[in-house]
Image: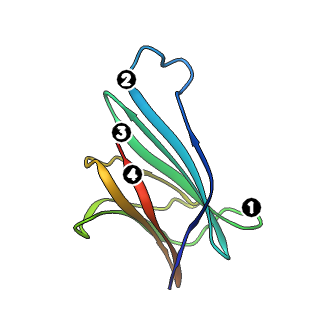
Amino acid sequence: MSQKGMLILESKGMIPGLRNRAQQSWSKLYKTNAYLLDIHYSCQVEKTELSGQILTLEGMTFENAGHVSLINLENRIVAMTRLDRFGYFLLTPKSKGRHQLMVEMRGSGIMVSDIVLD
């Protein structure tokens, strides 16, 4: 059963050393009653990445098998990857706009519905 992630921290800004390049980045931290989900988005001229890590509330890495899906407003999966053994993931989305992110693990999951990729 998926839990809705609650946004508890958001940071937007420039990446140091990239003043002369067009780019956008943000980081967001979400919480459920069992997990923390840390997400970072970086959009530069040559590449776009959405990366993150899922942790237990105690700060332990999540070693359970799982996968991450980025879903557009038409309910289509536009990017998908597996969690590594430390709970990390990396997506290279091609679509812009509003999305939801679904992290699914054995018996549980997190859904975040306010992911905007510019």
Residue pointed to by mark 3: 48
Residue pointed to by mark 2: 22
3D distance between C-alphas at marks 1 and 4: 26 Å
Are the residues tagged 4 and 2 within 8 Å (C-beta)?
A: no
> Which mark, by number, is residue 114?
none
Residue density around tag 3, few if under 14, some if 14–19, many if 20 or more, within 10 Å: many
Q: Is 45 or 89 nearer to us in this picture?
A: 45
Residue 86 seen in the figure? no
3D distance between C-alphas at marks 3 and 1: 27 Å
Which tag, 4 or 2, sits closer to the chain's start?
2
Q: Is 97 or 102 nearer to us in this picture?
A: 97
SS label for mark 4: strand
Q: Nearer the viewer, mark 4 or mark 3?
A: 4
Which tag, 3 or 2, sits closer to the chain's start?
2
3D distance between C-alphas at marks 4 and 3: 13 Å
Q: Position of residue 20 (x, y in %)?
A: 42, 14
Which tag, 1 or 4, sits closer to the chain's start?
1
Residue pointed to by mark 1: 59
Q: Amino acid at mark 4?
A: Val
Q: Residue at x 47, y 37 (%)?
A: 25
Splitting the image into 4 quarters, where does residue 79 fall? bottom left
Which tag, 4 or 3, sits closer to the chain's start?
3
Q: Amino acid at mark 3?
A: Thr
Residue density around tag 4, few if under 14, some if 14–19, many if 20 or more, within 10 Å: few
Residue density around tag 2, few if under 14, some if 14–19, many if 20 or more, within 10 Å: few
> Which mark, by number, is residue 116?
4
Q: Is 108 or 16 nearer to us in this picture?
A: 16
